[in-house]
Image (spheres, coloured by chain):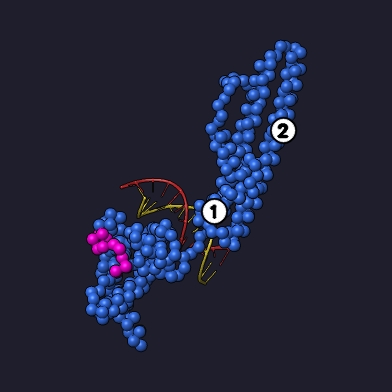
Chain colours: A blue, B red, C yellow
Amino acid sequence: VLSIRGIQDEDPPDPQIMRLDNMLLAEGVSGPEKGGGSAAAAAAAAAAGGSPGADGGIEHSDYRAKLAQIRQIYHSELEKYEQACSEFTNHVMNLLREQSRTRPISPKEIERMVAIIHRKFSSIQMQLKQSTCEAVMILRSRFLDARRKRRNFNKQATEVLNEYFYSHLSNPYPSEEAKEELAKKCAITVSQVSNWFGNKRIRYKKNIGKFQEEANLYAVKTAVDAASVSAQASQANSPATPNSGSVVTGRDREVRGARHNWPSVVRVREGLAGRFIAHQRLLWWAGRSAR
DNA sequence: GCAGATGATTCCGC
DNA sequence: GCGGAATCATCTGC
């Protein structure tokens, strides 16, 4: 085990160890105590979009407690390794001293032997550092992953998004401006709007049949809204502008629809069947309202 | 407790 | 950089 073959006298610092050391230092595991890594936790929580709410506080303290536990285990193991290393070094030194009675042993040889022992123990230390880093990573993902803080959007927000989606069914790709407008209306971020449309498009395309009823409902809603806008517009003697909330023009929709390869069947559905269903529903709705 | 719904993330291609 | 697809993790209704 203590072969000295291929060992150089002076090795450059291992970049792997340096990376591990830096990470452990940044997380507050190694180095001076800094509140059990609360700074790192706070930074990570902020990066994950976490707000300092009541439950966030509980999770935060839980995170700190677990991190402190990791820190404690890391230091106690490190101490054990260092102790074992010095004990083993002493043992080998004693053996060499004994051997020096029978054969000449140069100080250089002793020095080399000690270096070999230290190298072996430092590779064990690296394993400890690696597993500690893994533990911290798991802890971080466990506590700070945004997916674990998922909350459903409120009903009004979902309605706004669905209204936009179904009224732009031929090309449900809101522009950046439209996304910002929707985000403002729903009190969510633009990224969340993008996520929502991404998920919606996929899930709609996968199972159009399932979403048909929902599409119909929103088609009716849109038709009723358009009718009411139209009525108001004609009262005010001004031209009606259906879908005036949309930032995307008809031409844009055609071009971008083709680019994104949104299924043409969906476009037909909105164009003919959708309009027919909307018309039927409108009649039904009008009759019901009259009663 | 379970199945389905839903918001977020990741990977990949364009 | 954006969107599609797969997947994860959580929420919700039963």
Q: Earlier in the sequence, mark 2 or mark 1?
A: 1
Say if labels 2 and 1 share a chain: yes
**What element does badge 1 sit on?**
helix
Residue A148, image x and y in percent? 53, 57
Q: Quadrant of residue A108?
A: top right
Name the residue at 42% across, 66% down.
Answer: A186
Q: Which residue occupies 26% across, 77% down?
A: A233
Q: Along the horizontal axis of the image, is A241 left or right of A49?
A: left
- Residue at image position (51%, 60%) is A150
Type of the residue with mark 1: Ala
Occupied quadrant, residue A229: bottom left
Q: Position of residue A63 (x, y in %)?
A: 61, 52
For the residue marked with disc 2, what is the amino acid? Gln
Name the chain letter of the residue that bears numbered label 2.
Answer: A
Residue A252: say if magenta: yes
Tag shown at residue A110 = none
Mark 1, chain letter? A
**What are the residue bounds of the magenta stretch?**
A243-254
> Camera-side residue: A210 or A29?
A29
Is residue A256 among what the camera can see? yes
- A233 vs C7, left or right, is left
Q: Is residue A266 visible?
A: no
Give me the disc on residue A45: 1
Could you say which is closer to the camera, residue A237 or residue A152? Answer: A237
Relative to A86, A177 lies left or right: left
Residue at 28% over, 54% down:
A259
In the rendered view, would you say A27 is above or below A290? above
Q: Is residue A146 above or below residue A84?
A: below
Q: Quadrant of the C terminus of chain A?
A: bottom left
Query: Mark 2 sits on what residue?
Result: A83
Asked which secondary structure carries label 2, the reply is helix
x, y (%) of residue A125?
A: 63, 34
